[in-house]
Image (cartoon, grey):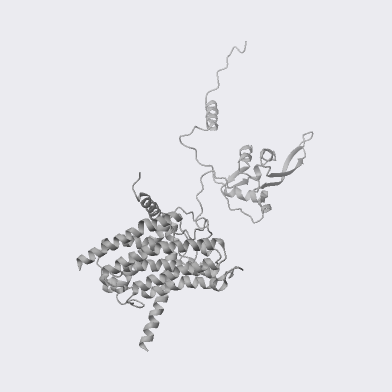
Amino acid sequence: MAEVLDVALRCAAVLTAFLTLPLLVGQAEHKVMAHMQSRTGPMYAGGFHGWAQLVADGVKFMQKEDVIPARADRVIFALAPAVALVPYLVVMVAIPLGPGLVGQDLDVGLFFVLAVMGVGVLGTLMGAIASANKYSLLGGLRVAVQLMSYELPFVLAAASVAMAAGTLSLVGIVGAWQWWWLLWQAPALVVFLVAGLAELARPPFDMPLADAELVMGPLTEYGGMRFAMFLLAEYAGIVVLAGLTSVLFLGGWHGPFEDQLGWLWTLAKVGLVSFLVIWARVAYPRLREDQLQSLAWKVLVPVALAQLVLTTVVAVVLA
Amino acid sequence: MTRFGSGLLAGLKVTWRNLVRRSVTQHYPDVKPELPPRSRGVIALQEENCTVCMLCARECPAWCIHIDSHKEVTPAEVEGGRDRSHNMLDRFAIDFSLCMYCSICIEVCPFDALHWSPEFEYAEHDITDLVHEKDRLREWMWTVPPPPALDPAGEEPKEIKAAEIAAAKRAAPPPPVDPAGPQ
């Protein structure tokens, strides 16, 4: 009985984090992006500096008509937003917040997380092909190409940390983390963050969505709640990416008073990385398709491979 | 050849500077804007000053001023005197859907009956509702600010100079009269 209660409690906690953190990041993006552009962003919803803007948006999305194009593949079209969203919920189960604060400590946590994150992109692909729309199809192809080229440096950078820590368990990796890994794993950190941004199709890597030319690409035909789910998936993706970056590269709960405030350190690091993600969106224009490809294959993959060599050498010397 | 990555840093720098500075957003309905002096918001009519001379209506490039009037005759007060006629203003309307805010009517008015008011919140749902009659134009007179002070470095207005000369003339003793009289 106690075991069932424990599982239920952990699931509830993960679900709560899944429902609140993406909204926090979304609201932060509203305000941070606005101020970076000398605006103020939402000011009215909820009374105080527009804190309830996303709640209002959610209500608006719910009221909208549920439109499915006549030529669309109805089942896949309806399923795609869920396929895009749910993997991030599943990933959150494995990301540790504090020494004992984790949904489920998996021995192959890193492998599990990377595999499930790849499924999220499949949701976008499904939506793209099921929409029966040329913009969606083009966007879907770009999503596929982007996934192909950026998955490699993403995984290589994560593998570097796993090699350094000698374990695939996320809790184990944070446990083995030392402060000088910040320097040792710095190239992998950059590669991981950039490739992660590209996997999420976040600006400046939003060529698949490219609202000015592809009318939001795979999301062209989506509206109302289905679109809101895709949007939520994007922000959940930021949270997951920020969580993984802090756990793998920034030492998770390590910091002063980590015995009492470990979870706060993790959350602070997640917030910091999310801020960087938003900052990159505001500061940089969208990369062209060929620039995207050359960045992945000519810069990120070689850097990630060099990092692997460096990690191997240092690990062997230390051993 | 610029240093590699300097563009990336510049992008971060600009956005960060904006983030830590105050935003430039005008919170308009909550905070009224501070308009500069002589703002052209709406044309107000000091009805009492109007003599129906029609100069404004004739000079208006957009033909947006409508004036109707009639003459009233005051009979002569004394025997054998002349009857006096007055122009009575019946209608004075400005169509703000045509007005191009050129200020010519205000410049041309010889009796200071037209003034600029900075009031600008008179949008309507129907374009025909933008024709405002003289009672509404008269109400806007209350929002006309006093004329701004003269620029201290500016030229002295010629009215002051004329008034000073006139005062000096009055104060000076009358010129001596030649006793011999004109030759």
In the depicted structure, whether residue A150 falls above or below residue B159:
below
Q: Furthest residue to the bottom?
A: A1
Residue at horizontal 32%, vertical 70%? A264
Q: Quadrant of the C terminus of chain A?
A: bottom left
Residue closer to the observer: B164 or A1: A1
Give the vertical position of A314 relative to B96 (above or below): below
Q: Residue at x 79, y 33 (%)?
A: B80
Residue A67 x/y as whole percent: 59, 69
Residue at position x 27%, y 62% from top?
Answer: A309
The quadrant holding residue A285 is bottom left
Q: Position of residue B167 (x, y in %)?
A: 53, 29
Q: Residue furthest right?
A: B80
- In the figure, B5 relative to A271: above or below? above
Q: Is residue B140 left or right of residue B155?
A: right
Q: Quadrant of the N terminus of chain A?
A: bottom left
Residue A246 in the image, given as x and y percentages of width and height: 33, 67
Q: Is residue A150 visible?
A: yes
Q: Is residue A286 visible?
A: no
Question: Which quarter of the picture shows residue A117?
Answer: bottom left
Left-right relation of A20 to B159: left
> On the rendered structure, is B22 left or right of A307?
right
Q: Position of residue A303 (x, y in %)?
A: 32, 58
